[in-house]
Amino acid sequence: MRPFPPYLTADVPGTGGIIKAVAEDFVVEEIPAYLPCGSGEHVYLTVEKRGITTLEAIRRIAKKLGALERDIGYAGMKDSVGVTRQTLSLQRIRPEDAEGLEFDGGRVLAAIRHTNKLKLGHLKGNRFRIVVRDVCASSSEAVSSVLAILQKRGVPNFFGYQRYGAHGNSHLIGEAMLRRNWKDVVDRLMGDPETVRDEQWQAAISNYQLGDLVGALRLMPRHCCSERDVLQRLVGRPDAWEKAFGAVHPRLKKLYLSAYQSYLFDKVVERRLTEIDCLLPGDLACKHVNGACFLVEDVTVDALRAEQFEISATGPMFGSKMKMPAGVVLELEQQLLSHEGIQPEDFDLGNGLRMEGERRPLRVPLGDPLFKVDPGNLVLEFSLPKGSYATSVVREITKTF
């Protein structure tokens, strides 16, 4: 796992503390882009889940309702830690068949008809309620100072460690995919035995590393579906690395590639962190109201708009068709790709695995922050735009990760 990035609020002491001690300490609720209208062939499910990812919730709901996973739409991905409330969409079901449905790790709170399928990005953002336990006794002043800085300068739009998967290696799998080194891809998918606690799982990975594919398959835990599917193919053809990796679900393959895009983006945020609220000549700036990007040619003309948080500089989610900046910004981003040994065209792997790329703001606005410090605990509430992570706010306050 790569080192943690620096802090924008490094001059303010951290509160310390522990996050996600229990599921109820981390609650996130989607802010929808629109509400279901009550009619149409699709049904919008308001789902509350805990301890499972969005994709796992989709799998379990599909099984309960006898539906296909690919028919279930979602606006955003939520990880497995905490309590999350989000909307899913499903076709060819009756609302009454889904409302109140319980599944392992969650339940359907509401089911209302609408005219279209939910697609990724169909939301405004997320509202968070986070409890940080065991903070310093005199935390209020530090929290207030950090939130004031973040409201004025913006929240660094890091993806952070949670974007790289439970073992911190998702971006490494994506990197190996771009290099078309399929043995390396499978090696990284199987992981490092030191990153897991389960002894049987550790033994499975060790057996794989020793070349004992049958032993690895026998010991690999049942919940490691991708690893087991790949091993199953390798047992029959031990050197068919690319064909073996073909057993992995296309959604997961895209997640690995996206994780590597995220890793590169985070590196750009780090390099520009101290001036994250500033513009450079050649920047592609985005308008926060609608996400539209434009080329910054004269910094003095647009500086006031950046100061008022109307616009922000963007960084690269590299891809085969990403719009490129100009000037010094282009040089910075090209240097990063060159150092990685990757070219934009490498992001098109064919067979439906093409990452076209996009621009992403280097900072985002912090919405409606509230906090209180109970004896030993800090309770935070705030909202962020879609695609941004609450940990980018919490880490600035605690300074622990």
Image (tube, rainbow, N blue to C red):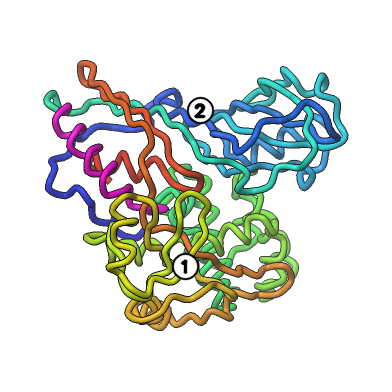
Is 89 inside the magenta-drawn segment? no
Dot 1: few (<14), some (14–19), or many (≥20) neighbours within 10 Å? some
Q: Residue 131 at what x, y percent from top left?
A: 34, 26
Residue 191 visible, this orientation: yes
Q: In the image, is residue 172 above or below residue 32?
A: below
Range drawn in magenta:
139-159
Residue at 39%, 76% in the rendered image: 333
Residue 207 visible to the viewer: no
On the image, the x and y values in percent for residue 146 come to 21, 39
SS of the residue under disc 1: strand
Alpha carbon of mark 1 to alpha carbon of mark 2: how far? Answer: 38 Å
Quadrant in the picture for residue 351: bottom right
What is the three-letter code of the residue carrying label 2?
Answer: Val
Q: Say whether residue 141 is magenta.
A: yes
Q: Nearer the viewer, residue 75 or 328?
A: 328
Q: Which residue is mark 1?
A: 294
Precedes in sequence: disc 1 or disc 2:
2
Marks 1 and 2 in Cβ contact (< 8 Å): no
Count of marks placed on residues: 2
Q: Nearer the viewer, residue 241 or 10?
A: 10
**Above or below — where is 20 with respect to 221?**
above
* Residue tagged 2: 83
Of 15 and 368, the residue lying toward us: 368
For the point 53% across and 65% down, the residue is 358
Q: Residue 26 in the image: x percent, y percent?
A: 42, 29
Question: What element does badge 2 sit on?
Answer: strand
Closest to the camera, between mark 1 and mark 2, is 1
Please state if 157 lies on the left or on the right of 271 as rendered: right
Mark 2 neighbour density, 10 Å: few (under 14) some (14–19) many (20 or more) = many
Q: Quadrant of the N terminus?
A: bottom left
Nearer the observer, 36 or 106: 36
Q: Answer above or below: position of 375 versus 386.
A: above
